[in-house]
Amino acid sequence: MTPVDVVVVGAGQAGLAVGYYLRRARLEFVVLDAQQSPGGAWRHGWDSLRLFSPARYSSLPGWPMPPYPGGGYPAAGHVRDYLAAYERRYELPVHRPVRVGAIRRAGDRLAVGTDTGTWSAHAVISATGTWWRPFVPTVPGGTLFTGRQLHTAGYRTADDFAGQRVVVVGGGNSGAQIAADLHTVAAVTWVTRRPPRFLPDNVDGRALFEIATRRRRTLDAGHQDTSGVAGLGDIVVVPAVRRARDAGVLRAREMFARLDHDGPVWTNGVAEPADAVIWCTGFRPALRHLASLGLRTEYGVPATDGTRAVAEPRLHLLGYGDWTGPASATLVGVGPTARSAVAEIAALPGIGARWADATAGRSPG
């Protein structure tokens, strides 16, 4: 069993951000990543996937994302390259590919079991994200449909559906972006549970982070909930979505009642043949490695105080969504919660004395 101060599970954007602050704190840590190479979930997005903000508003702590050639919203490949360079720049101790099996209590430490051995840590930061746990709702007749069914996580390029009839299910960002991506090559039916709500055209990722942060401060001060981003809408109007919306091709239909062999059927009996159904229905936190800790859950996820698990103060969860910090599932938003998580961990017994002795505030880069 190899001892360290902190084990970080996951080397996506959240894992790298917290690695930056662990390096500043001069703590001994490792980052365990199941992927073959850097980039986290950004290695697996569809070809036309873009950030919601220009590069200058999409940076991890310490080092701005380099400008995107030609300007505009960076493509997924640009983000992958940035994350890989970020790892190198700060010499983060990422071990890959390493699969974490289970985390267990071991006296005053936590034992992190992997397929390459076991690590012993004063604290663990889970930063596995959600991409690895796609959610597809159960729909009557779902097993009858003879066409292709896939989730957002399996979508790559519109060319795979050229000339086909495609039903896109989901009223969020992925549903709108994929429907917009497909409409030039396929016959697209966009289906949502409620009318789609487009954010104002001038709202991008930076504005979303600022809105989410203001909402968290309002709640923490005991004031009335402002609804934050949810009060404005659900869909960021990136250029491709704006073009499709303005061309009138992003018109959503209500959710169908069931699937049959040929495609969806609505409550009024209207049926529509389809070659494929793409479920843009979101993800759930990938937390199987925490099951052995028996954490108390709240709304289906571990109860947290900030990023710290209420039932296990040596465990922090980072980057899964607003329940682990305002906009913490975004590049620009994960930094503040990463910093606060490391500050809490640095005060734990066994670490606190060395934290006090370290040179405060010195940046590694």
Image (cartoon, rainbow, N blue to C red):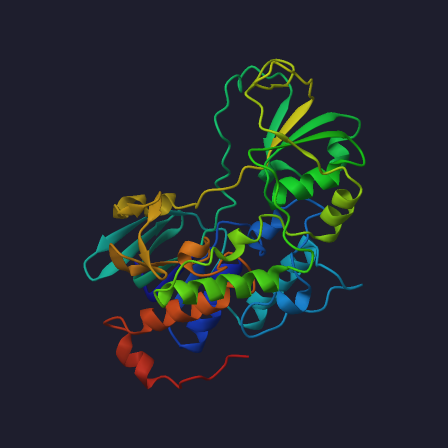
Counting from the top left corner in percent of width and height, residue 252 is at 66, 34
Question: Which quadrant is the C terminus positioned in?
Answer: bottom right
Residue 257 occupies which quadrant of the picture? top right
Q: Specify whether 324 is left or right of 140.
A: left
* Residue 93 showing in the rendered view: no
Compare residues 300 and 76 and report the one nearer the observer: 300
Counting from the top left corner in percent of width and height, residue 26 is at 40, 77
Q: Does residue 206 sit above or below 196 in this rendering?
A: below
Counting from the top left corner in percent of width and height, residue 195 is at 60, 38
Which residue sits at x=25%, y=45%?
294
Compare residues 83 and 333 and report the one nearer the observer: 333
Compare residues 328 and 252 and report the one nearer the observer: 252
Which residue sits at x=50%, y=59%?
327
Counting from the top left corner in percent of width and height, residue 113 is at 33, 50
Which residue sits at x=63%, y=57%?
80
Q: Specify whether 142 is left or right of 122.
A: right
Q: Does residue 30 sit above or below 132 in this rendering?
A: below
Q: Does residue 128 sit above or below 67 in this rendering?
A: above
Residue 24 occupies which quadrant of the picture? bottom left
Q: Which residue is outermost to the left?
A: 107
Q: Does residue 84 sit above or below 271 in this rendering?
A: below
